Image (cartoon, rainbow, N blue to C red):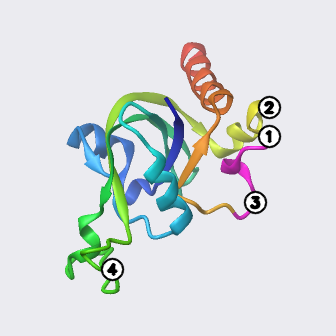
Amino acid sequence: MAKWLLKSEPGEFGYDDLVRNRREGWDGVRNYQARNFMRRMRRGDRAIFYHSNAKPPGVAGICKIVKGAEPDPTQFDPAAKYFDPTSDPDDPRWDWVTVAPDRKLEFVSRDELKGIPELADSALLARGNRLSVIPLTDAEYDAIVEFADAKRAAS
């Protein structure tokens, strides 16, 4: 089972929205590297749900991949925010995966993540990394979850 990190702006779609909807297509990925990461996702994989462009940004929960990559239908919908008129329905350019909530975590801010030794070399904290989908090592994933659980236990 692979581990991932998925970023979303909470004002657009946050972890609580995922809980309310129970499952959702992870739409709008329009970066080839992030798309290729999604194409590697499999049913049963786990992902850290990260709130980006928030004050403060940070980890909000865990979600699970419930359906692997398939064409993102928003690329073909002229009324959709993520419409791509250059994408060919016979050879779709963009994919999504379907995710469902696993469990909410005690919020861990980006500043707190910087203090976790296992994340020192993580793509998550790399300067200039703006990818909305990144792979995590088991050690990175476990360190985030353990930190959030310890934070909850301490409160």
Identify the secondary structure beneath mark 3.
Answer: loop
Identify the residue under disc 2.
Answer: 117
Identify the residue under disc 1.
Answer: 120
Classified by dominant secondary structure, the portion drawn in magenta counts as: loop
Identify the secondary structure beneath mark 4.
Answer: loop
Identify the residue under disc 3.
Answer: 127
CA gap, disc 3 to disc 4?
A: 31 Å
Instruction: Based on the picture, tell me whether residue 25 belongs to the magenta stretch.
Output: no
Estimate how packed mark 4 is, as few (under 14), some (14 to 19) or many (20 or more) residues with alpha carbons within 10 Å.
few
- Which residue occupies 29% across, 80% down? 88
Q: Is label 3 in contact with label 4 (beta carbons under 8 Å)?
A: no
Q: Amino acid at mark 1?
A: Ala
Mark positioned earlier in the residue sequence (2 or 3):
2
- Which residue occupies 69% across, 50% down? 123
Q: Which residues are magenta?
A: 121-128
Q: Amino acid at mark 3?
A: Arg
Identify the secondary structure beneath mark 1.
Answer: loop
> Mark 3 against mark 4, which lies toward the viewer?
4
Residue 1 vertical placement versus 127 (above, below): above
Identify the secondary structure beneath mark 2.
Answer: helix
Q: Amino acid at mark 4?
A: Ser
Mark positioned earlier in the residue sequence (1 or 3):
1
**Is residue 35 shown left or right of residue 24?**
right
* Foreground of the two, 90 or 139: 90
- Which residue occupies 65% across, 45% down? 110
x, y (%) of residue 92? Answer: 32, 71
CA gap, disc 2 to disc 4?
A: 42 Å
- Which residue occupies 38% across, 49% down? 14
